[in-house]
């Protein structure tokens, strides 16, 4: 078996960065196939109730990569997405730990209510 055909149990513990880097540099199509396979294997080996969410998240990551002009731009966009998610998680965690504070900190908005004539009244 070649290094490009990793079994799921081997895929995660035997990743050779230098080998993957060389493949990415010399054969981008093979690298993409390997990348897709290891991601799919990781998701398929996750608990069943988490797989749909993981596929959705991977779809978001793939879309960010496709929209980026280069790998560095993709990396920055994915990193930003991760930090935003972590920030939201921290906010939820803080709110759960101190619900009284969360209620008092919530911002209320004022709005002007516009009167509208009833459709029944205007038809007469």
Image: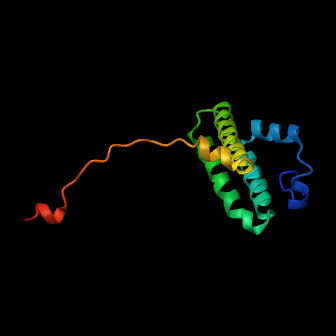
Q: Quadrant of residue 5?
A: bottom right
Q: Is residue 67 above or below residue 115?
A: above
110 vs 57, nearest the viewer: 110
- Is 114 left, or right, of 89 in this rendering? left
Residue 46, percent across and down? 80, 62
The quadrant of the picture occupied by the C terminus is bottom left
Q: Name the colour scheme.
A: rainbow
Identified at 79% across, 41% down, the residue is: 23
Residue under the point 59% across and 46% down: 63
Q: Quadrant of the N terminus?
A: bottom right
Front-most of 72 and 23?
72
Query: What x and y, as percent, mark residue 85?
Result: 67, 44
The residue at 79%/60% (across/down) is 41
Q: Left or right: 2 with respect to 38?
A: right
Q: Position of residue 68 (x, y in %)?
A: 59, 36
Residue 117 occupies quadrant: bottom left
Kindly give the residue lying farthest to the bottom in the view shown. Answer: 48
Q: Between residue 79 and residue 24, name the one nearer to us.
A: 79
Question: Residue placed at 22% from the left, 53% from the top?
Answer: 116
Of residues 23 and 114, the one drawn nearer to the viewer in this rendering: 114
Number of numbered labels in the structure image: 0
């Amino acid at each position: 078996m070649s290094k490009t055909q990793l079994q799921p149990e081997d895929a995660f513990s035997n990743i050779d960065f230098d080998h993957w880097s060389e493949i990415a540099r010399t054969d981008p199509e093979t690298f993409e196939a390997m990348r897709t396979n290891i991601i799919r294997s990781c998701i398929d080996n996750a608990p069943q109730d988490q797989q749909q969410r993981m596929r959705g998240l991977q779809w978001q990551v793939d879309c960010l990569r496709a929209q980026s002009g280069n790998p560095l731009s993709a990396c920055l966009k994915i990193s930003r997405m991760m930090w935003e998610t972590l920030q939201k998680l921290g906010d939820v965690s803080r709110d759960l730990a101190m619900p009284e504070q969360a209620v008092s900190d919530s911002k209320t908005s004022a709005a002007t209510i516009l009167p509208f004539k009833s459709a029944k009244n205007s038809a007469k």
